[in-house]
Image (cartoon, rainbow, N blue to C red):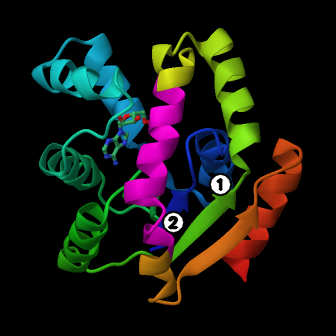
Amino acid sequence: MLNIVLFGPPGAGKGTQAENIKENYNLVHLSTGDIFRKNIGESTDLGVLAKSYIDKGELVPDEVTIKMLESEVNRYKDVNGFIFDGFPRTTEQANALDVFLKSIGTEVTKMVALNVPEKELVSRLLNRGKESGRTDDQDENIISNRIKVYEKNTAVLADFYDAQSKLENVNGLGSVEQVTKRIYNAIDN
Ligand code: AMP
């Protein structure tokens, strides 16, 4: 299986790029943010809980997020692999993912990290907020908290995968097509 962790701060372009990668390598795209938003739209218990964190730009608790991700992966049998978009976001999630994938006879192949400077992230997120209606992309305080949470809890995961020789850094600036090409190179390399 080919299992890619697509990594980077909010606004780095993970969702956009995941759609391209998915087509090219015939993978299942799992975005924890999208799954939470679907649950919010359907007013499930999970959605109500997730919303209380998402609205503040905080992370949904690990236990809930890990359980949800594992049950999503379990829905798919005989697939080429997965793109994990927005997961893992903490060391606990990364450890859980390693253990879980091992239990089903596979592992993370590579982490592709999209590198984008903070100033660019904020302007991309505010633009996306105008188009998508995502409330967490419309409020500069929520955006700044999400970037802070990323720096504090999530950024360290690059080291986690680097220690396993699985980290591929990709420049996330430029056109969507340019970045997609760089990602293909990183995956094929
Ligand atoms: P995203 O669509 O990836 O930007 O995620 C939107 C929001 O969903 C985040 O700001 C978090 O509140 C929540 N979220 C998404 N993925 C995770 C995760 N792996 N762990 C905790 N919270 C998450």
| Vertical position of residue 30 compared to residue 142: above or below | below
Stretch of the chain drawn in magenta: 142-158
Which residue matches tag 2? 4
- What percent of the width, then of the height, locates residue 135? 48, 13
Q: Residue at x 53, y 16 (%)?
A: 139
Q: Can residue 135 be seen in this view?
A: yes
Q: Quarter of the image holding residue 106?
A: bottom left
Q: Which residue is drawn at 36% across and 78% down?
A: 107
For the stretch drawn in magenta, the main secondary structure is helix
| Ligand 1 image position (quadrant) | top left
- What percent of the width, then of the height, locates residue 29? 48, 47
- What percent of the width, then of the height, locates residue 18? 60, 48
Q: Residue at x 58, y 40 (%)?
A: 15
| Vertical position of residue 184 compared to residue 71: above or below | below
Crowd band around label 2 with a 10 angstrom C-alpha radius: few (<14), some (14–19), many (20+)? many
Work out whether residue 50 or residue 120 is closer to the camera in this orientation and state it.
120
Crowd band around label 1 with a 10 angstrom C-alpha radius: few (<14), some (14–19), many (20+)? many
Q: Is residue 153 magenta?
A: yes
Work out whether residue 146 or residue 34 is closer to the camera in this orientation and state it.
146
Which residue matches tag 1? 21
